[in-house]
Amino acid sequence: MHNSMHRGDIAKWWMILSGVAMVVMGGLAYVDSNLVGSRPDAVLAMTPMHGAVHAVAGLVTIGIGFGLSGRTRAAATLLTGVAFMVAFALNMASPDFWGRMDMPVNNAVHIMHFTMGLLSLAAGFVASTEAVHRQPMLIHGSPLR
C-alpha cells in the first residue's frame, strides 16, 4: 500500500512545526539567552512579554495542526500567515510598538515574522487547493458520485 503525503498534510505539519518553534522561542525569551531574549547580544530581540505572545500563539498553532482538517485547517493556516504579515508590518512601522514594548525588536525578528508569514500563507494556499479538489461536488444538497 502506497503511503503518500497529501497537500493538506503540509499545512498540518507546518502548523505543528512552527507552533513548536514559537513555544520554544517564547520559552527562551523568559530564559533570556543569547539566542532569544532582551540581552544586547540576543539574535532575536524579544522581551518576556513578546515571548509570551509567541508561546500562546504557538500553542494555538499546534492546536490548529492537530485539531483541524481540510478547508478549516487551510483557512486557519492562511489566517496565521496574515497575522504574521500584520505583525511584520506593525513591527516595521514601529519596532517598539509605539512605546508599548520595553525594547524594540531587531532585524532578525522582522525576518522571522516575514518568513513565518510567507511560509504559513504558502502552506495554507497549498492545503486550500487540495481541500477544494477533495470535496465532493454538490447539486441541490446531493453529492455527485
Image (spheres, rainbow, N blue to C red):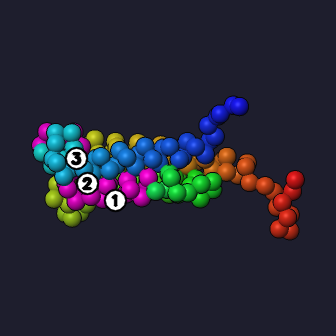
Residue that badge 1 annotates: 56
Check if mark 3's residue and mark 2's residue have beta carbons within 8 Å: yes
Provide the secondary structure element on which disc 2 rests: helix
Q: Is residue 91 above or below residue 18?
A: below
Q: Is residue 5 above or below residue 72?
A: above
Q: Left of 139 or right of it: where is 99?
A: left
The foreground one among 50 and 135 is: 135
Residue that badge 3 annotates: 28
Provide the secondary structure element on which disc 3 rests: helix
Q: Left of 33 or right of it: where is 124?
A: right
Query: Which image quadrant is residue 89 in?
Result: bottom left
Q: Residue at x 34, y 49 (%)?
A: 22
Q: Reply yes or no: does residue 61 show up in magenta.
A: yes
Q: Earlier in the sequence, mark 1 or mark 2?
A: 2
Residue type (three-letter) at the residue carrying disc 1:
Val
Residue type (three-letter) at the residue carrying disc 3:
Leu
Query: Which image quadrant is residue 98 in?
Result: bottom left
Can see residue 130? yes
Q: Earlier in the sequence, mark 3 or mark 2?
A: 3
Give the x, y percent position of residue 95: 25, 53
Provide the secondary structure element on which disc 1 rests: helix
Q: Is residue 28 above or below residue 82?
A: above
Q: CA distance from mark 3 to mark 2?
A: 8 Å
Q: Left of 144 or right of it: where is 68?
A: left
Q: Residue at x 81, y 57 (%)?
A: 137
Q: Left of 104 or right of it: where is 23?
A: right
> Which span is picked out in magenta?
40-62
Q: Residue furthest top?
A: 2
Q: Main secondary structure of the magenta part?
A: helix
